[in-house]
């Protein structure tokens, strides 16, 4: 096997290996909605209040997300103990989401409302009255059995009167219904787009590997250079190398061996034969097996070796 063929095989194997690693490490994750390898070192909490400014008696939606690493925390044990007084809970729900790397997100959704005196806006201020709910403890159990806690800090929100002075005297107030948002839609499915991008990336990778292989495969040198006996003279060594290179079509190596032969012949005082060797070595088509064999026969017959 030549060096070029071995290099081409190695390039092909490396290209396929890189493509396999890419598919295994990235494509498998997003195709299964795993999303990579991200996972928090400790539980992370975040909270939101919607709307941030509401009218008296309007239902307010509170959402708390607890992000955990399921390898370190039992997801089913994650719980939240909120205290919303003077607001009352109208409805609540708990859900678990995966797909953010290796992390799991436990979400708590509460719809709260207050129509008691404690929630009345300040009559001296027609602006919004600020409310701050006490932080809620999120508790969970680690895989090692330890009890873990994390605080959910709720953002402040404002409540203002829905009545102006004219409304109080002349009209009957009503509660606005929350808007219904349309479902999320895409012009192109994210999964289809991901597979198309993956296919294009793999084709580009394979194409690059093919181009590299077509270049390196041209190296026709043998993997192993023949071992020459130590007792050979410099001229005989050059002859053997030239014959081996010519027999295997290794033109550059054949030229080098013949050039070395010409140098050794001049040292022996055979300049005319050295010029003939150089002409064959640097001929336009390169040394052929027949021309090298003829030179070797002439040199050996003249006793120059």
Image (cartoon, helix red, strand yellow):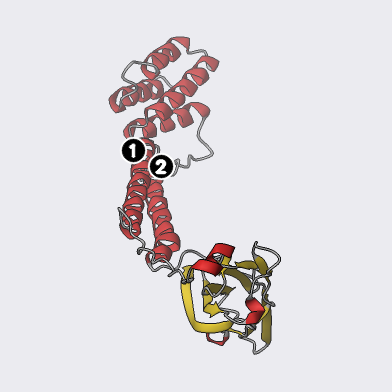
Q: Is residue 198 visible?
A: yes
Q: Residue at x 52, y 13 (%)?
A: 269
Under circle 2, the secondary element is helix
Residue 274 location, quadrant: top left
Q: At which x and y percent is residue 240?
A: 42, 32
Work out whether residue 88 or residue 68 is closer to the camera in this orientation and state it: 88
Give the residue at mark 1.
214
Q: Nearer the viewer, mark 2 or mark 1?
A: 1
Q: Vertically, is 219 above or below 198?
A: above
Work out whether residue 187 or residue 301 is closer to the camera in this orientation and state it: 187
Label 2 packing within 10 angstroms: few (<14), some (14-19), many (20+): some
Spatial distance from mark 2 to mark 1, Cα to Cα? 13 Å
Q: Vertically, is 39 above or below 148?
A: above
Q: Vertically, is 234 above or below 45?
A: above
Q: Residue at x 68, y 68 (%)?
A: 130
Tell whether 63 sits left or right of 117.
Answer: left
Under circle 1, the secondary element is helix
Give the residue at mark 2.
3
Check whether the beta carbons of the residues at disc 2 and disc 1 lie within 8 A of each other.
no
Q: At which x and y percent is residue 150?
A: 67, 78
Query: Which is nearer the N-term, disc 2 or disc 1?
Result: 2
Toward the top, the furthest residue is 272
Tell me the number on the disc at residue 297. Answer: none
């Amino acid at each position: 096997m030549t060096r070029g063929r071995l290099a081409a095989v190695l390039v092909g194997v490396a290209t396929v290996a890189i493509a396999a690693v890419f598919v295994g490490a990235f494509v498998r994750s997003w195709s299964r909605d795993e999303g990579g390898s991200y996972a928090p070192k400790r539980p992370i909490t975040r909270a939101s209040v919607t709307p941030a400014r509401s009218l008296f008696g309007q239902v307010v939606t509170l959402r708390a997300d607890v992000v955990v690493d399921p390898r370190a925390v039992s997801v089913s044990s994650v719980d939240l103990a909120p205290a919303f007084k003077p607001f009352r809970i109208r409805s609540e729900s708990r859900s678990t989401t995966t797909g953010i790397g290796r992390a799991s997100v436990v979400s708590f959704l509460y719809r709260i409302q207050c129509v008691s005196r404690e929630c009345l806006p300040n009559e001296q201020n027609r602006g919004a009255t600020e409310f701050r709910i006490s932080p809620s403890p999120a508790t969970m159990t680690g895989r090692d059995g330890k009890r873990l806690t994390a605080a959910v800090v709720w953002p402040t929100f404002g409540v203002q009167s829905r009545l102006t002075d004219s409304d109080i005297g002349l009209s009957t107030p009503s509660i606005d219904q929350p808007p219904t948002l349309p479902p999320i839609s895409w012009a192109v499915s994210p999964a289809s787009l991901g597979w198309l991008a993956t296919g294009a990336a793999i084709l580009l990778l394979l194409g690059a590997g093919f181009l590299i292989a077509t270049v390196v495969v041209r190296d026709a040198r043998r993997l192993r250079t023949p071992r020459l006996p130590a007792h050979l003279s410099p001229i005989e060594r050059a002859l053997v190398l030239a014959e081996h290179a010519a027999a295997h079509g290794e033109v550059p190596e054949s030229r080098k061996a013949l050039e070395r032969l010409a140098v050794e012949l001049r040292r022996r005082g055979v300049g005319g034969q050295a010029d003939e060797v150089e002409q064959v070595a640097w001929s336009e088509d390169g040394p052929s097996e027949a021309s090298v064999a003829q030179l070797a026969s002439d040199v050996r017959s003249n006793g120059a070796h």
